[in-house]
Every structure is written in structure tokens, then in C-alpha cells.
Amino acid sequence: MTMNNIQNIVSKVYPIIAKDYNSNAKVEVYTNIFDRLNSTPAILEYESYAEYSWDSNKIYLYTDNLDNEEDIIRSLIHECVHSNQCYDIYEAYYEECDLDYDTHPYEIEAEYEEEKWKKYKLNTIANG
């Protein structure tokens, strides 16, 4: 998908998702995390659809891995959930409980909410 297609979908669905999830995070779109950080990839296999920054209260979407409307909506929902979670608790689950991404309760909650993505579907063309 092109940057314009992604931004078009975000502009239509994100205000609704943000309202439903009581999030005031801003959304920025980049090619990938290395583009956002203006750095050279340390590993080539790194794959991320999106991330939430507690420091800046921003959701970053990465176009390299967003192939369709579903990916975009799921990513927005997932990161909106994180925007309402406590960063200190998020980190403590990793550091003190020795959990990984698949067993982390905050990630499980965010992935559960992603399943509601069809509520926000716009029926856009995936390859535009």
C-alpha cells in the first residue's frame, strides 16, 4: 500500500477508533522503524506493523508491513489499547515476571481487541 492510501485510511478510521478506546495518541506513518529513527538496520528481518511510544503519546505505523486495510485497523486498535496501559507495569511484566511477547498480559489484551477490526472496515481497495 502507498503512504497516501494508508494515511487516507487512518484519517477515516482513527478518529472513531481513538474515541472508542479513549485514546488521544497522535499517529505518524513511516516506511519502517529505521526510517523513523533515521538509522541503518542492525538486523534485516526486523518486522513491525506499528508501535506505541509512551514518552511521546504517538502511534507509529510502518508501511513496509501494512499490506491492507485490516493490517492498518488492527495496528491502530492494538496501539490504542497500549496507550491506555501503564508503562511501568508493561515493563515490569517483561523484567520481573520474565514474560515474552506471546505471554505478556498487555499484548494478549491488545491482540484480543484487534479482533474487533471489522467494526471499522471501510471496504477500501487493498492494492491501491
Image: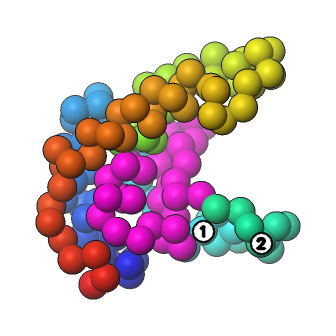
- The image quarter containing residue 113 is top left
- Residue 48 percent location from the top left of the image: 59, 58
Tally of numbered discs: 2
Q: Is residue 109 left or right of residue 15?
A: right
- How crowded pointer 1 is (Cα within 10 Å; few <14, some 14-19, many 20+) is rated as many
Q: Which residue position is annotated with label 1?
A: 32
Q: Amino acid at mark 1?
A: Asn
Between 26 and 8, the residue placed more toward the observer is: 8
Residue that appears at 82% across and 67% down: 43
Quarter of the C terminus within the rendering: bottom left
Q: Which residue position is annotated with label 2?
A: 44
Q: Amino acid at mark 2?
A: Leu
Q: CA distance from mark 2 to mark 1?
A: 11 Å
Quick check: marks 2 and 1 in contact, CB under 8 Å? no
- Tag nearer the camera, 2 or 1: 2
Judge whether residue 68 can be spotted in this image: yes
Between 104 and 63, the residue placed more toward the observer is: 104
Where does the magenta region start and end?
48-76
Residue that appears at 25% across and 69% down: 8
